[in-house]
Image (cartoon, rainbow, N blue to C red):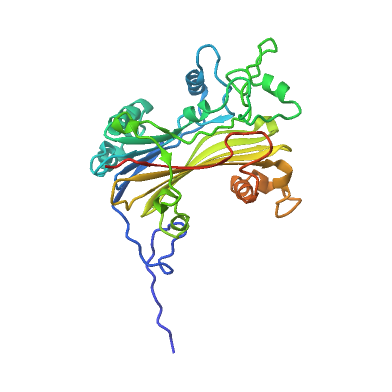
Amino acid sequence: MSVPSTTIPRLSATPNFDPLLKPAIHLPKHTLLEFPNSRSILVGNWRIIASTNPISNASQCDQLQSDLSSGNDGGIPLPEMTFGNNSLKIEWKPGGFIGRDKRQKRNRNPNHIDNAKEQDYSSESEAEEETQDASEAEWKYEFDTLHALLGVKKGELEPGDGGVKVGYAEEWLKSRTGPSPLLPMPKTVPTKPYDWTYTTTYCGHSSSSTAYTSTSWTPSNPAQAKHQIPLAELTRPDPILFYAEVPLFEDELHDNGSSALIVRIRIMPTCIFILSRFTLRVDGVLFRTFDTRIYSSLENEEGTLVVRETTGWEAPYDIVKSRLPKRDDLTPLTDPLFIAKILSELPQSQTIGAGTGWRGLGKRCECMKIGR
């Protein structure tokens, strides 16, 4: 007897979502916009713009170097891989942006898409139009490379900065005193001290220019569930409406390890979640991670609450190395996910750490209400 076949409709691929295993979930009204160097989504009261560009060229590095400088200090040498034009922006306004964002009309114009010359937008025109659109937002928060590097210590390291040294740190520093990390300066140029590991506790910044600028983060109430990030919701196999990964900088520390800052955003039908992760590996010395998590529900009935959680971990290199699944395979030590997992499991990684006295250790949770 033949068994009748069942035809399963083909659905668009969504990570961690199987319609056969989970009932359909209501998808909020949203609009996706795609451009050569940016992607964005309009959902609820939110507009999210992820800009991803190639590594900064020489002129862009010069401009960033100038922006980092104050007076005659010359700033700090830029990381080997600096993505100076990358950013993640989240914007909020009552009533949202769907149908109001000027770029929607441009994105939907078939003549515009078919015209190769018009598709190659100049950064100046894009920036001007984005500025006009952004003026509509009442609250804005952003992650970008400039402000991340402004968080790197300039000058002599002090207690709390978490300074790290390797055997030939002084010699290495002298080779990185010029604007370009690839061109050592002459030996006659004095060393400009800075944190050569590029450690930063940057957790994003508000770029609002309205009355919401005065709104500040306040410590979360542990007794209030809505003041915490709901891990159960984030681990559900809900469909993902929007995902972006935005690298800000990376440096191999002259073959002494690695230092990198990457921001990721995931938007699901019920919430917005951002993870900014700084990961440091100094071979033979230590591992360090600084995470910023930002969460906001798309189902708030009374205003919009944004939760921000920052966590810093640190541990000696050999302790993390001892947790390798295979003793002869060091590959996991280059994986930020593995490093963060091990650090979060070590009992003293948020208190004593690696004994550097770094002020970034520990966990802090704050919230901000931006709706009336």
**Residue occupying image coordinates x 73% and y 49%:** 322
Q: Is residue 294 visible?
A: yes
Q: Is residue 84 visible?
A: no
Tally the marks. 0
149 sits left or right of 281 in the view: left
252 sits left or right of 20 in the view: right
Front residue of 2/231: it is: 231
322 sits left or right of 364 in the view: right
The quarter of the rendered structure image containing the C terminus is: top left
Residue 238: name its quadrant: bottom left
Q: Is residue 127 above or below residue 25?
A: above
Front residue of 222/3: it is: 222
The quarter of the rendered structure image containing the N terminus is: bottom left
Q: Is residue 306 above or below residue 326?
A: above
Q: Position of residue 152 (x, y in %)?
A: 56, 27
**Residue occupying image coordinates x 69% and y 46%:** 320
Residue farthest along the top direction in this orientation:
188
Front residue of 79/272: it is: 272
Q: Is residue 237 above or below residue 38?
A: below
Residue 318: name its quadrant: top right
Q: Position of residue 208 (x, y in %)?
A: 34, 31
Q: Position of residue 9 (x, y in %)?
A: 37, 67
252 sits left or right of 139 in the view: right
Q: Position of residue 313 (x, y in %)?
A: 60, 42
Q: Is residue 64 above or below residue 186?
A: below
